[in-house]
Image (tube, rainbow, N blue to C red):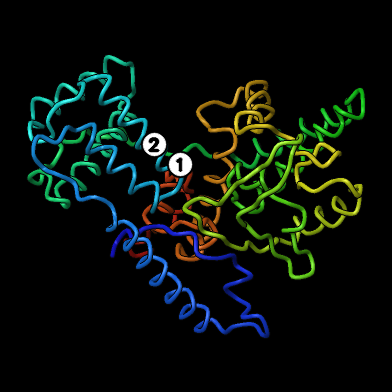
Amino acid sequence: KKNPPLIDLCSIDEAHWDGTRQRSKQEVNDFLDELYANTLKQKLAEKNLREPITHEKLSILTAMNYWLDEVAQFRSKATLKEYSILKSKYINIIGDHELRLFKREVENAFKIGLIKQGLGRNSQVKYAGHLQTFLYWAADADLMPRYKIKKPQKLKKEPGVYTKKQLEQIYTLLMSRLRSASNDREKRSRLNHIRLFNMLVYTAMRGGEVKNLLIENIDLSNKLIFIKKITGWSHNQKVEWEPKAKKEASIPIAQRLFSFLSQDLQSRNEKERWYLDDGLGNQGFGSGSAISAPISKILKVLDIKEIKPLHGFRSTVITELLEQGSPIVHVQALARHSDIHTTRSYYNGSKANLENLVDSIDLMEKD
């Protein structure tokens, strides 16, 4: 199946260790296949115990609620949130009506409503896609005939990447700010900016992954960083986080990053638990916007535009590796993209060295 339901099965440790010994790669795959099949079978059995959906005069709001119930079982919380926003926007723009009355006029009215709400072209495409997912679900459940939406054309924009000079400027300014810190709290905060920079530059990790990285998940002896589902505490509040698409992974530590981490982790006090820690065992940044804010300010000072503060590092690493001739499947594995086309979409072709490319053309015989 192209997009099988996502199910939280087990941790990486549970997959690789049977309680007495380490499993081989084939044994891990067999274990996960069996666990996935049994879990999915159980969830589908639970689903079938519910009352059947009646078709007659079923409202689109009711159908969407049934749909979201299934999404909550099989997809991530982020996906559920996105689809819930679609439902809210649809009801706000169109209102409730019989599902079978959905037709081209209703589709067009929804698209016009998105435009009136001030949404950009790419956001229009996103919500049209979400609506299409719902309509396919409804058709597969025999609630309505199959219907295909005419999606607005998405504007293609090359991902912004940093030049090496810009990265040097950012790092120099971060170090300057660290040296000018006026108190311990400010120093810890700015040191976290340096830690963030190093992790992003050498791993292509996502900002949320760095924010929620526990020190215990950095294994210097094996030079690995583990991206795992976590449950912890910060500022007396429970923190629950899981990787994108619920996929746990391990990332190799580059030698330069290893040198930095070796010194950095030795300097930590016994209270610190997070890679970006406030020095008291709490997360150094409270939200996604808080973690990107310091980089955003530096980009403004340096007049660097049209690059996403954190995601720009990810795009830059991917582009750099591809320009070096690294196999795209290896880059895909590092970026942890399920689809290789996603990896290609990060590559900014405008930054490619076209001068060397044209110099390599040799079609004429030399005199």
Q: Nearer the viewer, residue 186 or 281?
A: 281
**For the C terminus, which image quadrant?**
bottom left
Residue at 38% from the left image edge and 35% from the top image edge = 157
Residue at 33% from the left image edge and 42% from the top image edge = 68
**Separation (CA) of disc 1 from disc 2:** 6 Å
Q: Please indicate whether residue 293 sits to the left or right of residue 119 in the image.
A: right
The residue to which callout 1 is attached is 78
The reply to whether residue 367 is in sight is no
Q: Please indicate whether residue 94 sits to the left or right of residue 38 in the image.
A: left
- Name the spot of residue 102 as percent of width and height, x first: 10, 32
Please, what secondary structure does the residue beneath circle 1 have?
Answer: helix
**30 in relation to 135, above or below:** below
The residue to which callout 2 is attached is 82
- Name the spot of residue 289 as percent of width and height, x first: 60, 29
The reply to whether residue 89 is in sight is yes
Q: Nearer the viewer, residue 134 or 68?
A: 68
Q: Nearer the viewer, residue 352 or 250?
A: 250
Residue at 31% from the left image edge and 31% from the top image edge = 86
**19 in relation to 242, above or below:** below
Q: How many marks?
A: 2
Kindly indicate whether the residue at mark 2 contacts the one at mark 1 (C-beta within 8 angstroms).
yes
Circle 1 crowding by C-alpha within 10 Å: few under 14, some 14–19, many from 20: few
Q: Which mark is residue 326?
A: none
**Residue 298 falls in which quadrant of the image?**
top right
**271 in relation to 219, above or below:** above
The three-letter amino acid code for the residue at tag 1 is Ala
